[in-house]
Image (spheres, helix red, strand yellow):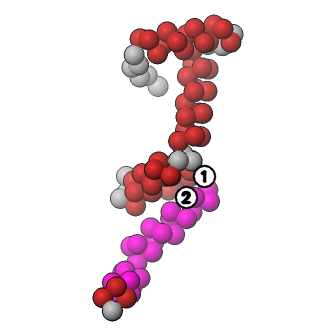
């Protein structure tokens, strides 16, 4: 994978890699892993992931890889409920009462 990053960020990653006896890739992979672990626990990020899944932008396996099996299964159940016309009709009827 290739990506562009600000020069200053690369310099910091390189300095940290030297200080810790690692290479740049190890530092970047570790940083990305930590970011994803932290971000996937944040409510706003979970909501964004759920919305992307409900809208068909993410597949179940992608969601599972980000938020874990339990949360992904909960999203799948809710997605099925949201797309089940009988449930949608029942909710609409209850709202109108």
Note whether 50 is above or below 28 in the view shown.
below
> Whole-percent x and y of residue 37?
59, 40
- Magenta span includes 54: no
Residue closest to the far right = 21
Give the side of residue 85 with respect to residue 78, left or right. Answer: left
Q: Report crowding for label 1: few under 14, some 14 to 19, many 20 or more residues within 10 A (C-alpha).
A: few
Tell me if label 2 and label 1 are in contact, CB under 8 Å: yes
Quarter of the image with the C terminus in it: bottom left
Residue that sits furthest to the left in the current view: 96
* Residue at image point 60% right, 33% down: 34
User: Eyeballing the image, is 53 above or below 21?
Assistant: below
Q: Tell me the tag on residue 68.
A: 1
Tell me the number on the disc at residue 97.
Answer: none
User: Crowdedness of circle 2 by 10 Å Cα count: few (<14), some, many (20+)?
Assistant: many
Distance between the Cα atoms at labels 2 and 1? 6 Å
Residue at 30 percent across and 88 percent down: it is: 96
Classify residue 15 by image quadrant: top right
Q: Which mark is residue 72?
A: 2
**Who's the residue at 66% across and 8% down the image?**
19
Whether residue 4 is situated above or below residue 52 in the rendered picture: above
**x, y percent for residue 18:** 63, 7
* Residue 72 point in image, percent of width and height: 55, 58
| Relative image position of residue 47 (x, y in whole percent) | 45, 55
Q: In the image, what residue occupies the spot 50% across and 65% down?
A: 76
Residue 59 seen in this snapshot? no
* Residue stretch rendered in magenta on the structure: 69-93
Can residue 70 be seen here? The reply is yes
Question: Relative to 26, is 55 on the left or the right?
Answer: left
């Amino acid at each position: 994978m290739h990506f562009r990053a600000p020069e200053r960020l690369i310099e910091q990653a390189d300095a940290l890699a030297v200080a810790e006896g690692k290479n740049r890739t190890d530092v970047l992979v570790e940083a990305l892993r930590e970011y994803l672990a932290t971000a996937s626990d944040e409510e706003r990020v979970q909501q964004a992931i759920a919305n992307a899944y409900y809208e068909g932008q993410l597949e179940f396996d992608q969601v599972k890889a980000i938020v874990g099996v339990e949360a992904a299964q909960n999203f799948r159940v809710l997605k099925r409920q949201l797309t089940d016309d009988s449930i949608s009709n029942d909710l609409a009827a209850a709202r109108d009462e």
